[in-house]
Amino acid sequence: MRRYAKSVRLQRVPRTARRIPRTVTVSRNIVRSRPPVLRRKPPVVAWSGIETGPYLDYSRLLTPEGGILITYKDIDTRLRHILWRVLAWCAYTGLETRLLLFYSPVESEWITILCLIAVAAVNFFILWKLPELYRSVEIRPDCMIIEGSDVFWLSRMDAGWPTFQPDNNGNQVLSGIYGTRFVEYLTVRRFDDYDRAPEVFAAHLQEAMQQLWAPPEMLGTKRNGPPRWQG
């Protein structure tokens, strides 16, 4: 008898999916701190607030450019301020005159005229005083800067440095030869009999010129030996 061998079919066992662990990515969150806001504080001047020191309306400061800045009080004598004062006097006096002539209950002409004279005089004394302002002079190693805009170079002062000369009113006038011209640089005014700002300003400005403009031989700071980098 024949024997039949029963072949066994191979059954495929489904593979179970193996879970592969995910790669952990480390994300670095760089937190950058904001840079501080640099706010430049204005320089504290001598006349801010109530002045208790002896330097009234006057200051002397060092600048980042290596100069010496001197600030003082002066009077603005420009023509536009004079015209504005005249226009203001005419406007106020005209308005008050109109009120006195047409709306005043006073019937006496003499009283009205006296009131007009008084009003015109009061307006004149109020507007007569010129406006005050602060001027600045900076001495640098190579130049002199007035009001932050007018630059006078040391190399063009061949005939000598500027000097102070008093005028008839007791003020100090800084003048000198610049190039081939005689120039009046500025005027330091005296406001009362006890004001000595012109003398103090002249002393400080001449001291600044000596420190920044004078050669080392005059100051005694020149070394006769070789420089340090030459041994």
Image: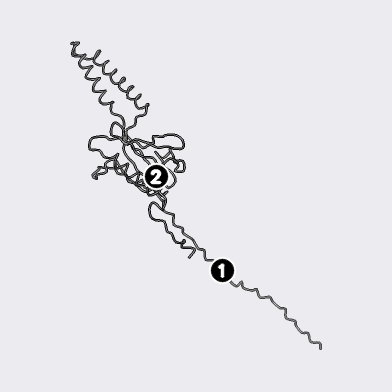
Circle 1 sits on which residue?
Answer: 23
Residue located at (39% from left, 40% from top) = 162
Residue at the spot 37% in from the left edge and 41% down from the top edge: 137
What numbered label is drawn on residue 139?
Answer: 2
Return the x and y of residue 103 as percentages of the image width and height. Answer: 24, 14
Instruction: Answer with the quarter of the image where residue 115 lies.
Output: top left
Picture layout, residue 161 above or below residue 38? above
Binning the other alpha carbons within 10 Å of mark 2 as few (below 14), some (14 to 19) or many (20 upward) gives: many
Q: Is residue 23 above or below residue 157?
A: below
**Crowd band around label 1 with a 10 angstrom C-alpha radius: few (<14), some (14–19), many (20+):** few
What's under tag 1, amino acid-wise? Thr
Tell me residue 183's x, y (percent).
Answer: 41, 34
Mark 1 or 2 closer to N-term?
Answer: 1
**Answer yes or no: do the residues labelled 1 and 2 have beta carbons within 8 Å?**
no
Amino acid identity at mark 2? Ile
Please identify the quadrant where the N terminus is shown. bottom right
Task: Name, please, the residue furthest toward the right.
Answer: 1
User: Is 167 on the left-hand or right-hand side of 34?
Assistant: left
In front of the other: 38 or 223 = 223
Q: Residue furthest bottom?
A: 1
